[in-house]
Image (tube, rainbow, N blue to C red):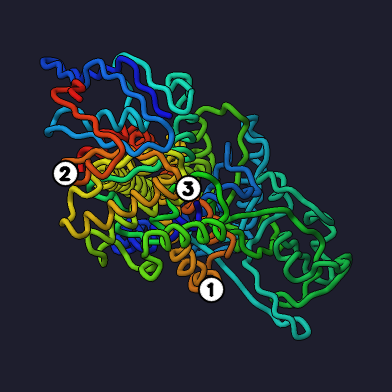
Amino acid sequence: MILLKDVTKVYQTKTIETTALNNISLEVPTGEFLSIMGPSGCGKSTLLNIMGMIDEPTSGQVAIQGQAVSDYHTKAVARFRNEKLGFIFQSFHLINELPVIDNVELPLIYRRISGKKRREMAQTALEQVGLKNRMKHFPGQLSGGQKQRVAIARAIVGQPNIILADEPTGNLDSVMGNEIMEILLNLNKELGTTIVMVTHDETMARKTHRLVRLFDGSQVL
Amino acid sequence: MTRHILRLIWNKKRSNALLFLEIFFAFLILFAVFTIVTRYMRMYQSPLGFQTENIWIVHMNLNPVTDTTATQDMKVRLKQELKALPEVESASYSGFVTPISNSSWSTSSDDNGFEISTHMMYGDLDYMETMGINLVQGRWFNESDRDARYQPLIISKKLFDESFKGRNLTDSIYDINGEKRIVGVIDHFKYKGDFAEEVNLSFFYGEDKTLDLPNLHLRVAPGTPAAFEEEVNTLVADITKRNDFRIEHLQTTRESRARQVWIPIIALLSICGFLVINVSMGLFGILWYTISKRRSEIGLRRTLGASKSEITLQFVGEILVVCLGGIILGAIFAVQFPLLNVFPIESINYYLAMIFSAALILILVVSCAFYPSQQAARIHPALALHEE
């Protein structure tokens, strides 16, 4: 379960202070598929980053699986992200110099898993997203949809409890977007993975359990 | 992780090629410089084997000789009168070849199928004492050698080790420029100076009156003022009735000769230092560029669970592997020099130069890689991911 209480995030430069999130309180129960919608710059990605422990709130509390995020020290945060969280990004963030299989293995490297075991786990994850036959290809040789499927395989390879997806269908056409959405829905349904997805697409958002809308950093729905 | 880094480096081989080549050429240049420097330093560190401090040499020209007996008597008298001066501790005559001069004289003989090659010097009974030579076996020349059946010979330890090791030389007769009896073995004697390799050397006996020993060596007391040279000059001129002699201060000659080697060594080391600075700047530049190009990858890795130290380690590791590749290729080229004996240089100099070059490059690379890698580790994942 993800719990946010009065979370505020303010970005401050020498001259400008921007409130990205304003007193957000949110609870995401285990197994829920939640979508977050809102116009550009309303703080969706910031909220997702705070849930993913890659950004810190200016004030407020965040607890994941019953543990306050502020209790973790830096290394523990890295370990927690590695073991419990999976990330999917709009622009895929694949390493172009590594073949698909190595990209998928990436989170496992930091988990000190043996090479053989890593390969097995990565193959299983690629099989789940229907890309087992592309594992030796490089990202540059794949379509946008395939790249996003690789990113999903990378997110699920470590069997995380929570997947945080930042506009996973944003760079894809509707057919490929639907394919990706199906994969995410299946993950949620079959494995019970909690998924928080930021999206601009109302149709995709309606397929999830719950929709949260943000406007100017505040929750409006 | 290692395999992951290796695969990443291999797949980025084009972008790593420049760094690889830079290290390869830097290694070869450093290897060349260090081979020269190591060789000279090793020669410099090996003992000279004789004193130069307070040693003066009177180089005399005895030609043309009109009255041999008178000249011989003059030589004996000159030595005696100089020795009688309180400032002179010891005096002796040597042959035409004197230490740290450009002169050399060598011979080789066939001794029952064994070739014995040696450089030759002549000295009288007092030469060892005057020059402070260290004897390791047997004795120096003495009065009994004047009328001995075989001419006495004193050889250097280097010659002994090369040609006579394990043999008892007592009363042994060997054919070295004619039959000679080896009576003693001296320790080191690098007669060509500090920056010269020690050569096989044999001392042949010469009486102080002999005309073939025209150079009079004087060991003056420590602290003898330079003005004493005038007194020596006057005495030599009075006795020899000539003024075409020259007084050499061996220590000055030694220092002057050493300077002739130090200057190119310092020049080479300066070039080397310049190269090192260039390589460092290049490495820094490459690393900064790499990090700026790979910010999103760093952000991704941090997001996926890499700790700061793992990011630092990865970047340092990547650069180290590429550099090791350049060093290994350079070492494959470099090792051909000792294996094929390309130049007459002891192999150990090449191997030491390879070690020094590799060590310097590795230290440099780690130092240059560490700071940018730490900076990479500090990149905030949320910002790095957002930038793309």
Tell me, yes or no, if residue B14 can be seen here: yes
Mark 3–mark 1 Cα distance, whole angstroms, equals 57 Å
Query: In front here: B178 or A204?
Result: A204
- How many residues crowd mark 1 within 10 Å: few (<14), some (14–19), many (20+)? few
Task: Give the secondary structure at mark 2.
Answer: loop
Amino acid on which the number 2 mark rests in the picture: Asp
Amino acid on which the number 3 mark rests in the picture: Gly
Tell me, yes or no, if residue B261 can be seen here: no
Q: Is residue A23 above or below residue B33?
A: above
Residue A211 locus on image (x, y percent): 24, 34
Same subunit, labels 2 and 1: the answer reads no
Q: Chain of mark 1?
A: B
Q: Which mark is residue A158?
A: 3
Residue B216 locus on image (x, y percent): 59, 49
Q: Which residue is mark 2?
A: A201
* Foreground label between 3 and 1: 3
Instruction: Give the residue at x 45% y 59%.
Output: B6
Task: Give the secondary structure at mark 1.
Answer: loop
Mark 3–mark 2 Cα distance, whole angstroms, equals 28 Å
Query: In front here: A25 or A40?
Result: A25
Q: Which residue is mark 1?
A: B341
Mark 2–mark 1 Cα distance, whole angstroms, equals 75 Å
Name the quadrant containing residue A69: top left
- Position of B90 with respect to B321 (left or right) is right
Sequence-first disc among 3 and 2: 3
- How many residues crowd mark 2 within 10 Å: few (<14), some (14–19), many (20+)? some
